[in-house]
Image: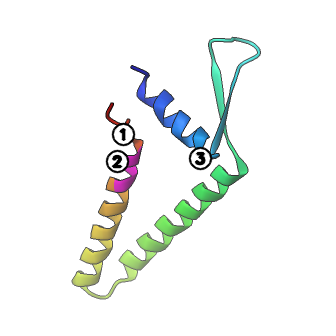
Amino acid sequence: MQPRVTVLLQKLEDQGLVERRRSTADRRVVETTLTPGGRRLLEQARQRMAAALLDALHSPTVEECERTVYAARQAVATLAQAMEPEAT
């Protein structure tokens, strides 16, 4: 079984979000960098999280805060689930 990070990096690489290469100094080391597409996706996620946080802080009602927190929890759960290795 491959380590979880290896599986996750393979998925990200398959989606064109990261690039991996062996270190020239130490062939046991794998260096990973974000691709331009990965950088765009990261920036979009940061902007969405900041906007959601600002909306939650400025929400005038408890109900709106609860909806925002629920949506954030769902987003985090989806992200965590995506990071889980697929069952074989």
Identify the element where label 3 is drawn. Answer: loop
Q: CA distance from mark 3 to mark 2?
A: 16 Å
Residue 27: % across, % down:
68, 12
In the displayed structure, would residue 5 be above or below residue 61? Answer: above
Q: Residues within 10 Å of mark 3 (few under 14, many from 20)?
A: few
Examine the structure image and report whether residue 2 is included in the region drawn in magenta.
no
From the image, which quarter does the N terminus lie in?
top left
Residue 84 tag number:
1
Residue 15 tag number:
3
Residue at (23%, 82%) from the top-left corner?
Answer: 62
Residue at (33%, 69%) from the top-left corner?
Answer: 71
Identify the element where label 1 is drawn. Answer: loop
Q: Quadrant of residue 53?
A: bottom left
Identify the element where label 2 is drawn. Answer: helix
Examine the structure image and report whether residue 80 is included in the region drawn in magenta.
yes
Residue 81 tag number:
2
The chosen color scheme is rainbow
Residue 67: % across, % down:
28, 76
Q: Nearer the viewer, mark 3 or mark 1?
A: 3
Is disc 1 in contact with disc 2, using a CB cutoff of under 8 Å? yes
Instruction: Tell me where the magenta segment starts and ends, as one range.
Output: 78-82
Q: CA distance from mark 3 to mark 1?
A: 16 Å
Q: Nearer the viewer, mark 3 or mark 2?
A: 3
User: Label 2 sits on what residue type?
Assistant: Gln
In the displayed structure, would residue 19 be above or below residue 52? Answer: above
